Image (spheres, rainbow, N blue to C red):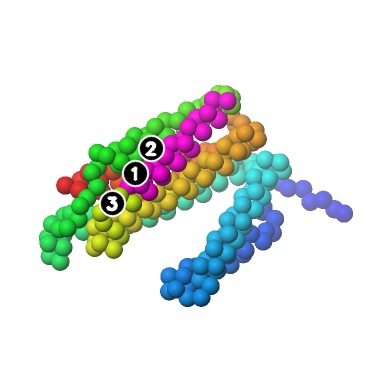
Amino acid sequence: MIKIKKYHLFHLVNPSPWPIVTSFSIFIMLVGLTLYMHNLTYGLFILVFGVLVVLFSMYLWWKDVIREGLYEGFHTQIVKQGLRYGMLLFILSELMFFFAFFWAFFHSSLSPSIEIGAKWPPSGIQTINCWSIPLVNTILLLLSGSSITWSHHALLANKQSDSTKGLIVTIFLGIIFTALQLYEYFEANFTISDGVYGSTFYMATGFHGLHVIVGTIFLIVCLFRQLNKHFTADGHVGFECAIWYWHFVDIIWLFLFFSVYCWGNS
């Protein structure tokens, strides 16, 4: 058997079943969601099945990526640089996603139409006090940004114990933020169906909450990897990506707090 030598630093990925499996599972999930929203038979079952298959395929796919980088040594400096660029482009796409929500909010609030009384917030909407739960959540996310930075710098200094502590604190703050956000939704006096204010408010803050949940899961995975000694001062691209994502979530929340909660409520 002739062994072919590799004369480059790039990683040519082996054939993998996970891209096509993930594509079909997402299709199944969307079909189930459509059936469920129309109250059709087995809609909920198909939706849950699709979500579970998506999560399962994501787990196995990322497990392969971790194995390729950690145990097989395929993640050279050039490959790591490509992974960082990919994460930055993903965050940029998410930024454009929120830009659309902010555009809708400011379009409706700066020039309110006659149908909603030509005023903002519209008549009949009892807005949420920005100095209550929203302010507490702002403090929590700012603290979480500090704790994840502490964790990162501790890892760079080879202080694994301090890095783990900072990561645990960040995860805890993220969970508290999500719990308070849910409580705020349950106590709010308006819903997503209450005109343009309800639509823009819940779309912007709700999708941000979803990003907080995803970021928290991202950090939990990093915590397990940290406990298993996967990260070193020179090799922690996955942790870096999680940190960037979490800081992005923090920055978006600051814009939401000052525009939607503070300025938009006056």
Alpha-carbon distance for marks 2 and 3?
A: 21 Å
Q: Position of residue 35 (x, y in %)?
A: 47, 73
Q: Nearer the viewer, residue 245 or 6?
A: 245
| Label 1 crowd (10 A; few <14 / some 14-19 / many >=20) | many
Q: Residue at x 43, y 51 (%)?
A: 210
**Of callouts 2 and 1, which one flags the residue occurring earlier in the amino acid sequence?**
2
Numbered disc 1: secondary structure: helix
Q: Position of residue 104 (x, y in %)?
A: 27, 58
Residue 162 colored in magenta in the image: yes
**Of callouts 2 and 3, which one flags the residue occurring earlier in the amino acid sequence?**
2
Alpha-carbon distance for marks 3 and 1?
A: 19 Å
Q: Which residue is mark 2?
A: 141
> Relative to residue 74, is residue 158 depicted above or below?
above
| Label 2 crowd (10 A; few <14 / some 14-19 / many >=20) | many
Q: Which residue is mark 1?
A: 253
Mark 3 and mark 2 in contact (Cβ < 8 Å)? no
- Dominant secondary structure of the residues highlighted in magenta in the image: helix
Can residue 238 be seen here?
Answer: no
The residue at the far front in this view is 187
Left-right relation of 162 to 265: right
**Of callouts 3 and 1, which one flags the residue occurring earlier in the amino acid sequence?**
3
The residue at the far bottom in this view is 40
Alpha-carbon distance for marks 2 and 1?
A: 8 Å
Q: Residue at x 66, y 50 (%)?
A: 64
Labelled disc at residue 188: 3
What is the span of residues highlighted in magenta in the rendered image? 161-184
Q: Amino acid at mark 2?
A: Leu
